[in-house]
Structure formats: C-alpha cells, structure tokens
Amino acid sequence: MAEIKKILCAVDFSEISSKVADYAQTLAKSLGASVKVLYVAPSLSQYVGFHVPPTSIETFVGEIVTGAEKTMDVFVQENFTEIDAEPKVVTGYASDEILNFVEQEGVDLVVMGTHGRKGIDRILFGSVAEKVVKGAKVPVLTIRP
C-alpha cells in the first residue's frame, strides 16, 4: 500500500492557491502527513538578454524573494490553520525547482494548481503543472480553477 508522509503544496499566490492549500491540508490531516509549501520566484537567469545592469537585476530579484517570503508567511498562517506547514521560497524556473524539491526532500505527493490555459496562451506560457506531471516520479494532484 502506498504511504504518503510528505506532501508538497506548490503555490503561485494566484486565486487558486488557497484551494490548493485546502486540498493539501485535508489530505495531510487524513493521512497524518507533513506539508511543505513551496513558491518559486523568478531567477536571475530569466533576465539574461535584458539591457539592465546586473546589480539592478540582483536587487530586483532580492526584493521579489523578500516580498515572496512575507507573502508566504501570511499565506501559510491563513491557509494552514489545522496543521503545521513548512514554508519555502526558492528561485528558478518553477517546474524545474518543483521537481528538484520533490527529489531532494523525498516528497510522496505533489498538490498544485493549474491555470487552465488553452490555445495561444498555453503555447506562449506553457504549463508548469504539465511539466511537473510529466517529470515527477511521484503522484501529482492538480487542482483546476
């Protein structure tokens, strides 16, 4: 029988994130599992090619991470009222960082939202959820808006 002891709740602070957190909390309570809540902020490498001084980019990304950490603390307080959840903010490409986190932390289940993009939006923006589903070695529960 599959054992789920560690759940990764991947969020982007969009409207669906609280719904994703609700599923993660419900599952964790039912299974006696722990929850790690992950937000991936954009990395410096995503700004390569822009004609901006590197120090400006470093400052900008640093401010994003600091803001994300504050937002994460509030998000966890508001959305994980029945269990303890461990917040984590990292930088990089979302799908890559989520998959790395799963491997490094020994996660048993990923819970994340989808944006439900279709057509040209999906082509232009891609799908983090789709990349995680295809790349993860553990089950991924996706929550639609």
Image: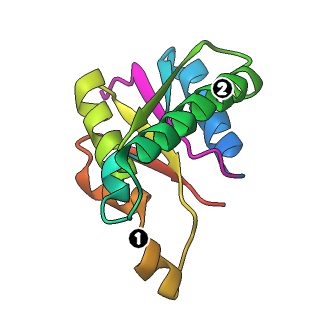
Residue to which mark 2 is pinned: 70
Hey, what amino acid is under mark 1? Answer: Gly
Report, in whole angstroms, how far the alpha carbon at label 2 lies from the one at label 1. 27 Å
Q: Quadrant of the C terminus?
A: bottom right
At label 2, counting other C-alpha atoms closer than 10 Å, the crowd grade (few under 14, some 14-19, many 20 or more) is: few
Q: Earlier in the sequence, mark 2 or mark 1?
A: 2
Q: Nearer the viewer, mark 2 or mark 1?
A: 2
Q: Was residue 33 drawn as part of the magenta stretch in this picture?
A: no
Question: In the picture, residue 81 is in which quadrant?
Answer: top right
Report the side of 47 relative to 79 (left or right). left
Q: Was residue 2 drawn as part of the magenta stretch in this picture?
A: yes
Q: Name above or below for residue 88 compared with residue 112.
A: above
- Please report the residue visible at 23 percent of the width from the left and 31 percent of the height from the top: 103
Considering depth in this image, is 40 or 4 the residue closer to the camera? 40
Q: Where does residue 28 sit, x and y in percent of width and height?
A: 55, 23
Tell me the magenta residue range: 1-14
At label 1, counting other C-alpha atoms closer than 10 Å, the crowd grade (few under 14, some 14-19, many 20 or more) is: few
Report the side of 105 relative to 113 (left or right). left
Q: Where does residue 25 sit, x and y in percent of width and height?
A: 62, 27
- Please report the residue visible at 55 percent of the width from the left and 74 percent of the height from the top: 117
Q: Which mark is residue 92?
A: none
Q: Which mark is residue 126?
A: 1
